[in-house]
Image (spheres, coloured by chain):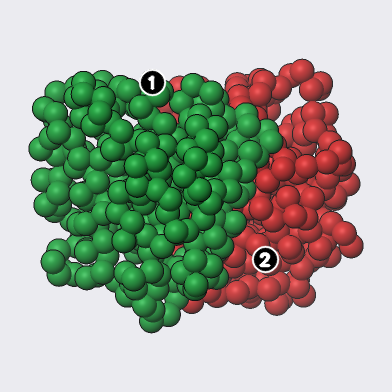
Chain colours: A red, B green
Amino acid sequence: MTATALTAVSEQKCFGGTMGVYSHASTSTGGTMRFSVFRPQGEGPFPVLTWLAGLTCTEETFMIKAGAQRFAAREGLMLVAPDTSPRGHDVPGEAESWDFGVGAGFYLDATEEPWARHWRMESYVTQELPALVEASFPADMSRQGISGHSMGGHGALTLALRHKERWRSVSAFAPISAPTQCPWGEKAFSGYLGQDRSRWAEHDACELLRSRGPLPCEILVDQGTADQFLERELKPGLLEEAAREVGQRLTLRRQEGYDHSYWFIQTFIEHHIAHHAQAMRG
Amino acid sequence: MTATALTAVSEQKCFGGTMGVYSHASTSTGGTMRFSVFRPQGEGPFPVLTWLAGLTCTEETFMIKAGAQRFAAREGLMLVAPDTSPRGHDVPGEAESWDFGVGAGFYLDATEEPWARHWRMESYVTQELPALVEASFPADMSRQGISGHSMGGHGALTLALRHKERWRSVSAFAPISAPTQCPWGEKAFSGYLGQDRSRWAEHDACELLRSRGPLPCEILVDQGTADQFLERELKPGLLEEAAREVGQRLTLRRQEGYDHSYWFIQTFIEHHIAHHAQAMRG
């Protein structure tokens, strides 16, 4: 893979660095994918924090709404944000729900039809995208962190546990902690992975902590107490329980009065960037 | 006017304070208007910074894209952002251009038909909105500042000069400095104010500096050197020239490589919030 495989959709100066959106033909998903990159000022190589966004988001949501560039610039950290699913494949049913199909890839490789051909976000995020970033930007791929929000928080936790060698630091905002035990996860997993629940466990952060944990790094999680999805979908208590069982270091902060939005993320993003930057220096 | 005249569209916790979007029946524009407010944590009363957005923006653009709440929260400053025009009136031609009509009120009261009935953004921003904010929020209206971007930078400068008693501090990002001498301004002023150019001067920051300046406060302006509208529409050199002529204190910073976007604004918003906060304390 070479740098010329990328098309720059836009590149704009931001905090002394460059805010860019790129598109490319993806071998993982068999179509055009977009991702965004904030690259700090200077030569690099820079450690890389990959952000996985939540349901309905795109590669731009985090970059526009989180206010992370200010701190990434300060810490000398590159930010990479992929899209939340393949798009433009006209798979039957892909646009019928906001929580399944387009905008809802759940960061796994689907095994069921009609999704198995294109919905391969785990391969995309853990293999193709890092290779492309390494080839195209001054990135130090020996220092990578992963974070995300909601469905992307699920993605950050599960991919960190499934690909331990790749990530040095992990955090999440309001993650779907136990997708095998909530409506969003049940819908996605039955659609993408089929009815055999034993295969679902391989993509559930709590189950993965038990089967593959603990991670050597501390996991930082922020969760708003006024989050409208807290009880039904997110269930952070289950993550705490699994972490306790396997001895995973976990700082789970319940932030009083905050909801599920990027206003909440904006408020606490500084701490997350610092968390990752510290691990990159370590 | 009472607080019950307002409908809260949304209120969400952000940096310990409240990020809200509100709608109300506007007497100035004869229809429903929306505006957004960031209110810091605490009892107040808080000084108020009004932000005027640019062409095509809404009451949400600045709040979502500028990252200003972090610093407003730190300084104890309330942020108020109105929409950029009336909407929903089905005035013939209102949606034909992105730089005229809807999303392009230019912060003046139109005198020409079919705009004169609804397009009254100067009355709205300088009278109705402050009264509504005073009645509904813990605002200290003796300490107000105004800022904005592009068309909103034009608005901030011209409204500051036309209503000197109201604002204690003024700043702008990439303002349309001399709308009587650029295509955006000529199109808007001929449409809203008619062909008599002598009336245009009353809404041109450079002309107003000469006729009503200087302001007692220092004006802070940031302008990107890679701004795609710099030469044709913005013309900061004319503002510098007028300021020099009348002895207006002006800090105009040309920021190397930055364009017209909110990435530019996000990079320098901290300085603008500090500029206003300092004037409020003074």
Q: Pointer 1 indicates a residue of which chain?
A: B
Residue B222, given in percent of the width and then of the height, sits at 57, 43
Q: Is residue A111 visible?
A: no
Residue located farthest toward the bottom when viewing the structure as drawn: B43
Residue shown at the point (26%, 61%) measured from the top left:
B130
**Is residue A157 visible in the rendered structure shown here?**
yes
Q: Nearer the viewer, residue B20 or B93?
A: B93
Residue at the limit of the structure toward the top, as seen here: A4
Tell me whether circle 2 and circle 1 mark residues in contact (CB < 8 Å): no
Question: Which kind of residue does numbered mark 2 sit on?
Answer: His
Q: Is residue B94 above or below residue B154?
A: above
In terms of image quadrants, where is residue A266? bottom right
Q: What is the CA distance from the residue labelled 2 to the residue labelled 1?
A: 45 Å
Badge 1 crowding class, 10 Å Cα cut-off, few under 14, some 14 to 19, many 20 or more, is some
Could you tell whether A180 is left or right of B37 in the image?
right
Q: Say which residue appears at 75% left-offset and 55% top-offset.
A: A74
Q: Which residue is denoted by mark 1 in the rendering?
A: B183
**Secondary structure under badge 2?**
helix
Q: Position of residue A160 (x, y in %)?
A: 74, 53
The total number of labels drawn is 2
Residue that numbered label 2 is attached to = A271
Q: Residue at point 38% right, 64% down?
A: B144
